[in-house]
Image (cartoon, helix red, strand yellow):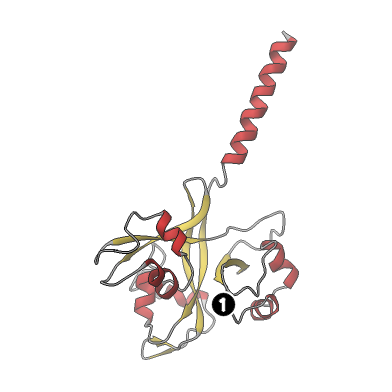
Amino acid sequence: MKLKNGLLLFFLFVECAFFKVDSKCVKGCDLALASYYVMPLVELPTIKNYMQSKIVTNSSDVLNRYNKVLVTNHGNIFSYFRINIPFPCDCIGGEFLGHVFEYTTKKGDTYDLIANNYYVSLTSVELLKKFNSYDPNHIPAKAKVNVTVNCSCGNSQISKDYGLFVTYPLRSTDSLEKIANESKLDEGLIQNFNPDVNFSRGSGIVFIPGR
């Protein structure tokens, strides 16, 4: 009997261990922010259309809540300026935290244009290929493309003080010191939430505590 009980406990332990490894997320969080870098000639309604969700709609003024200064000129946002876009942070397939936006293509669109121009590196060509079945060399016009943007709900083992995080695409002018100064956060705290990340690499995504 002891042997049987021992074997049963062993198999339960193995099953639980495998479950923990396979389950990479259980649930998301209600809100995350995307740091959207505004390129020249891009209008605010266009950005809202790209980043539309149950939180942001074309008629929504919700952006004012998450941006201390939303600098506009007759509806146009000044270029080379980051704005925070709120969006839901979901657990996608039990694998990772993110949200899937829907983009309608135009003639001549490519995954590179969608990822790096329209979504300003908030997503990647690799993610677009993974979650869409279109031929990368021939994406039809008026097609619906799934645009996956990663997000974070924080890590209570690092700090319980922050529950809102910014998905922040790194640019060539960024550094850990610069981001810390702009966000008024400690460099060590930001690095702890992004272990082993080189903030001066000029590409990729990091997660910055928003509050």
In the rendered image, the residue lying farthest to the front is: 137
Q: Is residue 184 visible?
A: yes
In the rendered image, the residue lying farthest to the bottom is: 73
Q: Splitting the image into 4 quarters, where does residue 155 fall?
A: bottom right
Q: Who is closer to the viewer here, 64 or 28? A: 28
The quadrant of the image that shows the N terminus is top right
Whole-percent x, y for residue 198 in the image = 67, 69
Q: Who is closer to the viewer here, 168 or 126? A: 126
Q: Who is closer to the viewer here, 73 or 198? A: 198
Q: Splitting the image into 4 quarters, where does residue 204 fall?
A: bottom right
Helix, strand or loop under label 1 = loop
Q: Who is closer to the viewer here, 64 or 195? A: 195
Count of number-bearing discs: 1
Whole-percent x, y for residue 79 in the image = 46, 87
Q: Residue at the location (68% across, 80% down)? A: 181
Q: Splitting the image into 4 quarters, where does residue 146 fall?
A: bottom left
In the rendered image, the residue lying farthest to the top is: 1
132 relative to 199, above or below: above
Q: Residue at the location (47% across, 46% down)? A: 93
Q: Residue at the location (50% across, 86% down)? A: 80
Whole-percent x, y for residue 137 in the image = 32, 64
Q: Residue at the location (44% across, 64% down)? A: 125
Q: Is residue 60 visible?
A: no
Question: Crowding near pointer 1: few (<14 within 10 Å), some, many (20+)?
Answer: some
197 relative to 29, above or below: below
The quadrant of the image that shows the C terminus is bottom right
Inspect the image, locate mark 1, and give the three-letter code of the amino acid beneath it: Arg
Whole-percent x, y for residue 75 in the image = 36, 87
State left or right for residue 119 relative to residue 10: left
For label 1, the residue is: 171
